[in-house]
Image (cartoon, grey):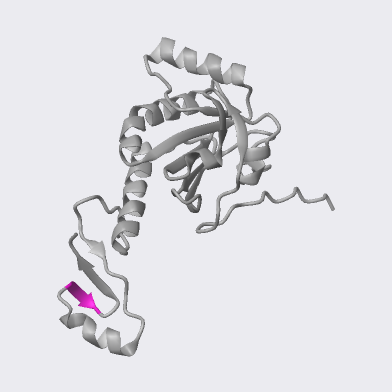
Amino acid sequence: MEPQAPCPAFPRINEPAPAFKAETTFGPRSLEDYRGKWLILFSHPADFTPVCTTEFMGFARAADTFRSMNCELLGLSIDSLFSHLAWTRSIKQNFGVDITFPIIEDLKMEVAKAYGMIHPGAGDTSAVRATFFIDPEGKLRAMVYYPMSNGRSIDEFVRLLQALQTSDAHGVATPENWKPGEAVIVPPPKTAEAAEKRASEGYDYVDWYFSRKSL
């Protein structure tokens, strides 16, 4: 019987994100540097790969949108700073897109392993397409994994950040494919008495557990 490959460790939602200190294309960065801001930390399998190139251009084009929401971007792969710099310069030369956010050099895979970015079944030492949303208090709020063969949707990450921030600000949930301006979901009542009152509270009422409202 062949020995099983070790399972990657995964951080958990609503717990502190793993701390890190790393060299990047913009100089040293640590998780603490982003305190007070949202952070989207995302990994890619390797520099100079076509799918990753499209993703990085997508993140770069949306960088101002993220910054307007108090959110910074931080990339990572198991490549050197020299490779990162050569790749971003190639993107600028070939596609006219500036990569305006740092990329972590993670040759020892310290950050990748702490965040569960290395999946032995997907590749040897390449990080899968993992994306982590970390809030201003350093807590992990969402994580999304894609296979190496398929690129991520940057529009969905913008939408998800908008939803997270709306839930935090108003104490509500958001329905499937919610977008700003649409109705949100009111948290369901937790007692029999509260459930009985729900229909008379002025919400867009469907049943005691399902009510919506506009913000």
Horizontal side of 42 relative to 181 (left or right) equals right
Queried whether the magenta region covers residue 117, the answer comes back as no
Horizontal side of 5 relative to 138 (left or right) equals right
Q: Residue at x 57, y 38 (%)?
A: 128
Horizontal side of 9 relative to 43 (left or right) equals right
Give the magenta part as a residue range: 203-207
**Count the marks: how many?**
0
Queried whether the magenta region covers residue 206, the answer comes back as yes
Q: Residue at x 20, y 60 (%)?
A: 183
Q: Between residue 214 and residue 175, name the one nearer to us.
A: 214
Name the residue furthest top.
Answer: 93
Q: Is 181 located above or below residue 93 in the figure? A: below
The quadrant holding residue 16 is bottom right
Horizontal side of 130 relative to 161 (left or right) equals right
* Image location (x, y in percent) of residue 162: 31, 48
Name the residue furthest right.
Answer: 1
Question: Which of the image's four quarters has the C terminus?
Answer: bottom left
Q: Is 138 located above or below residue 98 in the figure? A: below
Q: Is 180 located above or below residue 78 in the figure? A: below
SS assignment for the magenta stretch, majority: strand
Q: Residue at x 60, y 21 (%)?
A: 81
* Image location (x, y in percent) of residue 23: 61, 28
Q: Residue at x 42, y 24 (%)?
A: 100
* Image location (x, y in percent) of residue 65: 31, 35
Q: Is residue 19 something one can see in this rendering? A: yes
The quadrant holding residue 86 is top right
Q: Is residue 153 something one can see in this rendering? A: no
* Image location (x, y in percent) of residue 110: 68, 38
